[in-house]
Amino acid sequence: MRIWAVANQKGGVGKTTTAVTLAGLLSQRGQRVLLVDMDPHGSMTSYMGYDPDGDGSSLYSLFHGGCGSVAAMIRNTQFEKISILTASTALATLDRQLGTQDGKGLVIARGLSQISDDYDYALLDCPPTLGVLMVNALAACHYLIVPVQSEFLALKGLERMMRTISMMNHARMAPIPYLIVPTLFDRRTRASGQALENMKERYPQALWNSIIPVDTQFREASRAGSPISHVASRSRGSIAYSELLEELLMFDESDHGIAAG
């Protein structure tokens, strides 16, 4: 199983959309995909038809159940090859509850190792804050996808994310390969163009050579609780993510990584 984390230390940049869309595209290629919602807000959980305030097993159970039966915590979705480990709003309390507990940063890596033969890919949707959840995702992932909204304030979140990657690289056996993906790009606005040029100047080796455009079909797909590739496969957004997936798979197959901070 290959593990891709989707993270940025700013909300509203398209993390959940990126994870769900890539999962949909991978499933259409016959890949078995596990979505892992690591954000206490539970946007991905809601997207897939579950309630982050509801009862039942969730990612929170994994942190408080040691490395019990991870498979029993996973739920089906309406899509045959996509499963989900749902979030719970209680995840917001983990940093305070776990404190200095040994091994708290490796819970996800150890849990996913139990089911590594059951899925081809796991996509981790991370919270927008640095804490035990993001540390777990970065410790577990093989690749990191960093969606960045094409506007000025999002660039500040990207700067924080780059510092976090640098910090994690000191703790890992090998640097985290990552790709910066410009999202919500609107060709009609000067702000989007300027933000993209800024990213090209500051992160030329780590920046994807294309963009994810603004597309109203993303909203329609979210309302339908479906990846955009399943409801509007010829939309601009779906085509852009298909191109992104090709890039990710190319590097995944070569196992060389995309960039190392």
Image: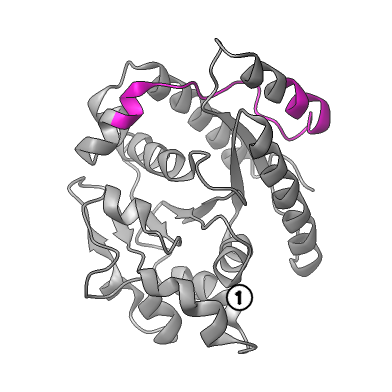
Give the image quarter of residue 208. top right
Residue at 39% in and 62% down: 117
Q: Position of residue 176 (x, y in %)?
A: 70, 53
Q: Residue furthest bottom?
A: 101
- Specify start and end residues of the magenta stretch as a single range: 197-219
The color scheme shown is one colour
Give the image quarter of residue 105. bottom right
- Residue 202 lies in the magenta-colored region: yes
User: Image height check: is 115 above or below 67?
Assistant: above
Answer left or right for 196 relative to 140: right
User: Image height check: is 239 above or below 116?
Assistant: above
Answer left or right for 189 relative to 72: right
Residue at 30% in and 21% down: 233
User: Image height check: is 2 above or below 86?
Assistant: above
Q: Position of residue 106 (x, y in %)?
A: 58, 75
Q: Position of residue 181 (x, y in %)?
A: 60, 33
Please count the marks in the image. Answer: 1
Visible residue check, residue 256: no
Q: Position of residue 206 (x, y in %)?
A: 73, 35
Q: Which of these two is toward me, 3 or 135?
A: 135
- Residue 169 lies in the magenta-colored region: no
Q: Which residue is mark 1?
A: 105
Q: Which of these two is toward me, 146 or 223?
A: 223
Answer left or right for 77 relative to 253: left
Residue at 73% in and 51% down: 160
SS at badge 1: helix
Visible residue check, residue 105: yes
Q: Residue furthest left?
A: 78
Residue at 78% in and 54% down: 163
Q: Residues within 10 Å of mark 1 (few under 14, many from 20)?
A: some
Amino acid type, callout 1: Gly
Q: Which of these two is toward me, 151 or 173?
A: 151
